[in-house]
Image (cartoon, grey):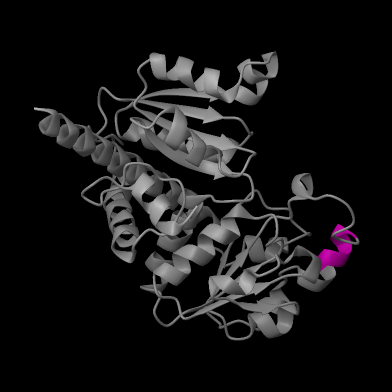
Amino acid sequence: MPIDAKRSLQLNDQGQLRHFLSLDGLPRELLTEILDTADSFLEVGARAVKKVPLLRGKTVCNVFFENSTRTRTTFELAAQRLSADVISLNVSTSSTSKGETLFDTLRNLEAMAADIFVVRHADSGAAHFIAEHVCPNLAIINGGDGRHAHPTQGMLDMLTIRRHKGGFENLSVAIVGDILHSRVARSNMLALKTLGCPDIRVIGPKTLLPIGIEQYGVKVYSDLASGLKDVDVVIMLRLQRERMQGGLLPSEGEFYKLFGLTEQRLKLAKPDALVMHPGPINRGVEIESAVADGPQSVILNQVTYGIAIRMAVLSMAMSGQSAQRQLQAEEQN
């Protein structure tokens, strides 16, 4: 699908967000607006009453065809803080396992008058399919699809970097590990490029680097030491055993020996380099505990910023859908 087709699906006629499916093709101004909106929501989490009335009377439905405690929980919290009603369905254990199709499941949910679907699915492109064919008049948020995209994770990583480093224009950022199976890596590369980061590095064993990854405008390294030299940010990725087939890795021990982030290796980066990880962490496989819990780690901050980003995306997509419906109604009159 060409970028402009994706863009028109995600944005309404005024260029506002109406679905959030991928960061591909979204303009820098919109990504900045998401970050700015999330910034304004961070203080809600510090209040005694952690609520704003933006989505009062709206229903947010989390439809997870793939398990994820952290993403589902932060979307639930984000929707509740916006005063929405929240339904969470772990569909992997319900209707689809009884032979009901994705299409039927969503049609039934649509009949319950939900306003926003947050969808997580093991198949790449599932969220696009739903936004295009099943529920075009509801806001669809991609909570992660296959190896394709995890746009809210990409944006919460950008918020983490911006809050700790101020901006993107002078940064060197390294993304390390299982790039091949990682939707987070793809979303991060797109976001960093769009936001003007001049030096994006991907580091991993050759078997875990996708063919043609250079098209993202990144520098590719298969040696950790040279890739980490003088970077400002290190984003470690989880080894995705469940998505691997065959012998892509000799062993987890071998991976840690060559690509695990230890205190010693972190010294190759700048002294104030941030350490990030989308979670859940495999300690002693991707990262040493002393680094994960150390002074340069912002892994727990990422979780906090994730709630604010998801609040921003939910509220902006709802607003964009409402504006589009209003425009269509005016045209019909």
Q: Is residue 224 magenta?
A: no
Q: What x and y, as percent, mark residue 245? A: 84, 49
Q: What x and y, as percent, mark residue 271? A: 56, 82
Q: What's the residue at 73%, 51% (across, down)?
A: 240
Regarding residue 226, the answer to whether it shows in the image is: yes
Closer to us: 155 or 99: 99
Q: What's the residue at 66%, 77% (across, down)?
A: 220
Q: Is residue 68 above or below residue 24?
A: above
In which quarter of the view is residue 122 placed?
top right
Q: Is residue 299 above or below residue 48?
A: below
Q: Quadrant of the C terminus?
A: top left
Q: Relative to residue 317, is residue 186 drawn left or right? A: right
Q: Is residue 43 above or below residue 84?
A: below
Region in magenta: 251-256
Regarding residue 72, the answer to whether it shows in the image is: no
In which quarter of the view is residue 201 placed?
bottom right
Q: What x and y, as percent, mark residue 273? A: 54, 76
Closer to us: 109 or 310: 109
Q: What's the residue at 49%, 55% (across, down)?
A: 302
Number of labelled discs?
0
In which quarter of the view is residue 32 placed?
bottom left
Q: What x and y, as percent, mark residue 102? A: 57, 24
Q: Main secondary structure of the magenta part?
A: helix
